[in-house]
Amino acid sequence: MTESTPEVPSGDLTARLKAGPVICAEGFLFELERRGYLSAGEFVPEVALEYPDALRTLHVDFQRAGSDVVEAFTYNGHREKMRVIGKEDLLEPLNRAALEIARSVADQRPGDLMAGNISNTNIWDPEDTARQAEVRGMFEEMVGWAVEGGADMIIGETFYYAGEALAALEVAKASGLPVVLTIAPMAMQEMADGIGIVETCQRLEQAGADVVGMNCFRGPETMLPWLKQIRAAVSCHVGGLPIPYRTTDEEPTFFNLSDDRARVPSPHGRPFPTALDPLYANRYEIGAFAKEAHGLGINYLGVCCGASPMLVRETAEAVGKSTEASRFSENMRNHFMYGDNERLPEHIVALGDQA
C-alpha cells in the first residue's frame, strides 16, 4: 500500500489529485446523531459550540481512518437553518468554532487539507430571484468565514437544484481557493429544476470547479452508473461520496427506501433518517465501490451520511492507501472459530459451522 499523503504541495488539491486518490470523510450529521450530540430531523451542527471535544474526536477518528480532508462541520449551519430553530444569533460563532476545530485537527497531520463547507439551503427557488439573492448572501458570509478561518479549499455539496449549485460555485470560486462541487440528485433522475445530471456537472466544470461529481442521497448501486457518465463527460477531477445504504433502481435514494421487515416501523412512516440501520451496506460493498470508482479515474472519494471511521478506512484501503487505523484492520486468522492460528483447538474451530 502507498502512504496516505502523497509527497506534493500540501495545500494544492489538484496536485494531490493528480498524484493519486484523495479521501474526504463526510457524514457528520448521522454519526454525531448516533453518538448523541445532535437531534435527528433538525440536524443542526450546534455540536461545534456545545460539545467541541466530541466534534474534534470525530474529526480525528476520520483522519486516522484515512481522510485527507478535514471538512469543517458547517453543513446546515447556514442562516436559514438557524432561523428555523430560533438561534440565528449563533450563526457566526458556530461557523467560526467549526472552522477552528477543523483547522486545528488538519494541522496535527502535515499535508492534510482543511475545507470550508457550503451546501443546499432548502429555500432555493428557480422562479424567485429574491430567494436566490438571499441564498447567495448566505453562501458569501460562510465562504468569507472559511477564508478567514484558514481554509485550504471550499466544498459545496448536496445540491439538488442545478441553479443553486452554480450559484454556490460562483461564490466559492470568488474566494480564490480550489472548489469541490458535488450534486445530489433526487429520485427523478434529473436535477429539481429539470436540468440533466451530467449536463449540470459539465456546466460546473465550465464555470471553474476543480472537482465535480456526486455525494449523498444515493448508495453505491445508484450512484456509480451516473459517475461513469460524468467521468466520461468532463475533463476535470470527479468526486464520488455515496451513502452506505442499499439503494436500488426502484428506490434510488435513501429518502424512499422501504423496510417491509421492520417489526416496529418508524413513527414518521419511512426508514429515513432514523430507521435505516437494516438497509446498511457492509464494509466490503463500500470498498468495492471505491475500488471500481477509482478504476474509472475518479480520485476524490469518500462516504457521506451514514459514514463511520471504519467505512472511511475501507475506502482508503480499497484504493491502496495505508492509514493509521489500518493497524486495526481485520485479522480473522486469530478468531477463535474462523481462524487458522495453530494454537486454536480443532474442536473449537469446528464449531464455526454449527454456531
Image (cartoon, helix red, strand yellow):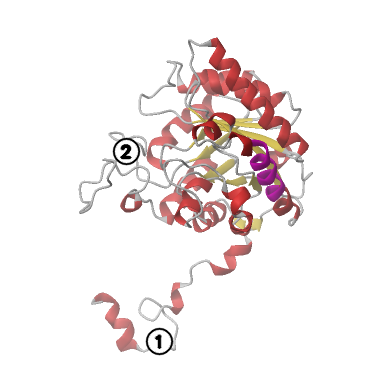
Tell me where residue 219 sits by quadrant.
Answer: top left
In the rendering, at what x and y percent does residue 246 appear? 35, 45
**Residue occupying the point 47% across, 56% down:** 36
Q: Quadrant of the C terminus?
A: bottom left
Does the magenta segment cover residue 120?
A: no
Element marked by disc 1: loop
Q: Nearer the viewer's eye, disc 1 or disc 2? A: 2
Q: Residue 112: which numbered mark, if any?
A: none
Residue 183's place in the image compared with 19, above or below, is above
Name the foreground residue: 252 vs 108: 108
Does the magenta segment cover residue 94?
A: yes
Residue 35's place in the image compared with 139, above or below, is below
In the rendering, at what x and y percent does residue 257 appear? 30, 40
Query: In terms of secondary structure, what is the magenta stretch mainly?
Result: helix
Q: Residues within 10 Å of mark 2 (few under 14, many from 20)?
A: some
Name the foreground residue: 36 vs 342: 36
Q: Amino acid at mark 1?
A: Leu
Tell me where residue 146 sits by quadrant.
Answer: top right
Residue 153's place in the image compared with 34, above or below, is above
Q: Is residue 306 left or right of residue 250?
A: right
Element marked by disc 2: loop
In the rendering, at what x and y percent does residue 289 appear? 46, 45
Q: Is residue 349 left or right of residue 236?
A: left
Q: Which residues are magenta?
A: 91-102
Q: Residue 344: which numbered mark, if any?
A: 1
| C-alpha distance separating marks 1 and 2 | 42 Å
What residue is shown with label 2? 248
Q: Amino acid at mark 2?
A: Thr
Tell me where residue 340 sits by quadrant.
Answer: bottom left
**Residue occupying the point 37% across, 44% down:** 273
